[in-house]
Each structure stands twice: as C-alpha cells, then as structure tokens.
Amino acid sequence: LSICFRTVEPLEYYRRFLKENCRPDGRELGEFRTTTVNIGNSAPGSITTADGSALVKLGNTTVICGVKAELAAPAVDSSNKGYIVPNVELPSLCAERFRSGPPGEEAQAASQFIADVIENSQMIVKEDLCIANGKLAWVLYCDIICLDYDGNLLDASVFALLAALKNVQLPSVTINEETGLSEVNLKQKTPLIIRKHPVATSFAIFDDTLLIVDPTAEEEDLATGTVTIVTDEEGRLCSVHKPGGSPLTGAKLQDCITRAITRHKEVKKLIDKVIKSITPK
Amino acid sequence: PGDTSVLAGLYGPAEAKLSKELPDRAALEVLLRPKVGLPGVMERSREQLLRQTCEAVVLGVLHPRTAITLVLQVLSDAGSLLSCCLNAACMVLLDAGLPLATLFCGITCALQPDGAILLDPTARQEQEARAVLTFAISSSERKVLMATTKGSCSVEEMQQCLAAAQRAADTIFQFYRDSVHRRYSK
C-alpha cells in the first residue's frame, strides 16, 4: 500500500516522513549516506592508464575521476601557468533522464562548477604546473564520469576530483639544452602539490523551510531548491552555489554553512585514512 | 548599472513542443548570448542559474503545457554582468505581465584584499577583488533566491556582504517601481 502511495503522491509521502524528522531510507535530516572511496592504480575499480584516479560512492551515486597529465606550451599572457581542464560527463547509462549526444545543460553546469571550485579554492596553483617558463607546462585533464546517478552529483564529483589529484604522480621532466626537446623521466615521480582541500556539501530545500543534507535523486526531484556549499580546511567558503529555488533567509544559510564545515572534517579524515593505507607501495 | 548593458526579450506563454512541455506547469527556457562568440560552458551555467531563479518566482502552474522563453543578449560587459542579467530578467517578466510570486533583483559584491565591501564592482575591481559574490534577493522579506561566489572568503565576510546586498536591494526595487510608473503613466 505504501508503494502505491509513494508513486501516486510522492510529495505527501515525503512530507509524512519529514514531519517525523527522518527520511524514507531511514536517515535523519542531517545524515549523509555511506561514503566509500577507492584511490590508486592497484585498487579495484580504478583506472590503470590514468596518472591518478579515484572512485567515490555516496550511497548509490557512483562517480569516477581520472586525471591525465600531458605537456603543452603555456599561454602567451600567462607564461608561468599550466592548465587544469575538468570535464564532467553524465552518460546515459547513469540515469534514464540523460540522453546520449552532446553534453546537456546539467553536465556543462557541473563542469563549470568544478572549474570554479578549483579556481576559487586555489587547490592547485597553476604556477606549480609550470616546468619551463614560457616553454613547457603540464596540462591536467580531469575527466569526471558519473556511473550511477542517485542525487548529489556535485559533492561526489568534488570528492572524486580531490582524491584523484592526491593520487597523481607527475614524472620529472628536463629540457635538453642542446636539442631543446623535453625528456620525460618516468622512473622519477613526484606527487602533485595540493594546497587546499575543498569539500562540497549539498542540501535540498523543501517547502521553503526544511533543509536536508545529501539528497537522493528522488529527493532532488521533489525539492523546491538546492544549495551547495564548498569549504576548505580553514573554514573559509570557496563557493556558495544556490541556483534559484525557494528563497532562504540568511540564518538558514548560516546553518548550512555550519553543517558543511562539520562535514569537511569527516571527509578529510576519510581521505587521509585512505591515502595512508595505500602509501607504503 | 554603469556600462554593463543586457537586452532581454521574453516570448510566452506560448505553445510548447511536445518533447518540452510539462503537464502541470510552464516550461521555462533561458538563452544567454554573449557579446562575442558562441555560447560556451560559462553561459550554460549562467543560464541554469537564471532559469532556476525564474522558475522559483514565476507561477508556472497557472500556465501548464506552455513554454516561456527568455532571451538575454549581452551588449556590453563592464563588470557585474550576472546581476545585470538578473535585473533585466525580472524587469522583462514584469513588463510581459507574467504572474510572479515575488520580484527579485541581482546584486554583486566584491571583497577587496583589504576587507572592504564594494557593491556593483567594475570589471577592474572584480579582477582585483579577493572574492566576488552575486546574490538574487527577493522583494518579500529580502530572502536569498540565488547565490554564487567566485574566490574564497570567510563565513563572516559572506554574511556581511549578504547584509549589504539586502540593504541595497531596497534601492533597486525603488528603481523598478519608478520605471514601471514611468512606463504606464503616459
């Protein structure tokens, strides 16, 4: 009987749960789904051809990120900066609403969001990617692909990106003075310098008042708005992304920010634990 | 404001294509055309922001199975482009007479390196700023409809910018009132 009710009147079904301060999958309003992360070339579910990779699961939402480093000449106006190119893909296998073909609006907006987060948080400083001023620099192509979409894409993508970048080892490059060509030494590898660790926390707004954390796809459809807050380890806001939806008062926004800061600590602990477990290679 | 100008045109509620129509509400579409070049990823994400802000405000349930198309053409960009687009969008919704739940206005704040808050920054000030925050504030109770930030700032600074933006919203709503008054009192 409850399945019928859920299909016919999903909003009412949800409201009954929200009144009791919980959700159909048993979580509380402020509780996240189980987060698992797989980093590195030897772990199952990672990419061996990429320079760095990570697989993140937030409940059912699965996102994999692969980072490939290539060499290129820096731009004329910023000769000491490398490039980071994030690309988010939502292939049709992850959810039935996404059709195959050119990237839809959601994928493009997500790519722009990730690019903004990298830029705002100064996670990777582009000057660090420069090898020889004006001649050679690294380009990091970050491909973030969603394998299973069950809500909260932005959180999972930011987490996957961070984990993959922590895993990247750049080979050392020397420029041969006589020939002017670059020589890549694959034996000598140094890890990428990551300055800040941004973590995203997404909330769904219901009926202008209730805020729930880590929405599933069903909750996102029923919600009247979403908010995503990206914080770094110093408690600074790297991004506040609230694309329309119900209006929020400043106080409610402050509650979101406080929750986001707590979440940051949990995620940081998780990442540190996983990195430590794979480092003695 | 200043030298930034955006031209907005609204078409609708008109008949929607079968693939796009929604059974219970109007389907809103926003197209943002930059001054030079083809629309890119940045335009797409801006369109998404504008679309969701407008969807929250327009009473779409009064016009089911229709399409409302909002086209914005950037004529010149001298800073604060997103809030200019937001203001243009709201005025064009008003002008078309679409039923709205509340009005909104766009305000950009730049946080300078020394901590000073600057409203409606020019392109130069935006570049030098530590962080640029754009808010869409609604006319009822000054709540936040939309927020985006560029650059990082602390939580207190964000709250201060938000408070400043809410105060400035009053001036902009007064401007809306004056413009509409001028238009209809001929």
Image (tube, coloured by chain):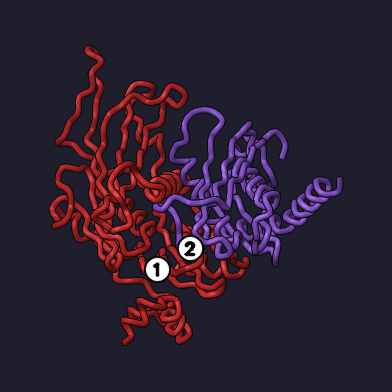
Chain colours: A red, B purple
Residue drawn 22% across the image and 13% down it: A179
x then y, percent, for residue A251: 61, 69
Q: Which chain carries label 2?
A: A
Three-letter amino acid code at the position of disc 1: Pro
Q: Are marks 2 and 1 in contact (CB under 8 Å)?
A: yes
Residue B49 in view, yes or no = no
Question: For the view shown, which residue lies furthest in the right direction?
Answer: B186
The residue pinned by badge 2 equals: A226
Q: Residue A215 carries which label?
A: 1
The image quadrant of residue A75 is top left
Mark 2 or mark 1: whose residue is earlier in sequence? 1
Q: Residue B63 carries which label?
A: none
x then y, percent, for residue B181: 82, 50
Quick check: B59 left or right of A52? right
Three-letter amino acid code at the position of disc 2: Thr
* Callout 1 secondary element: loop
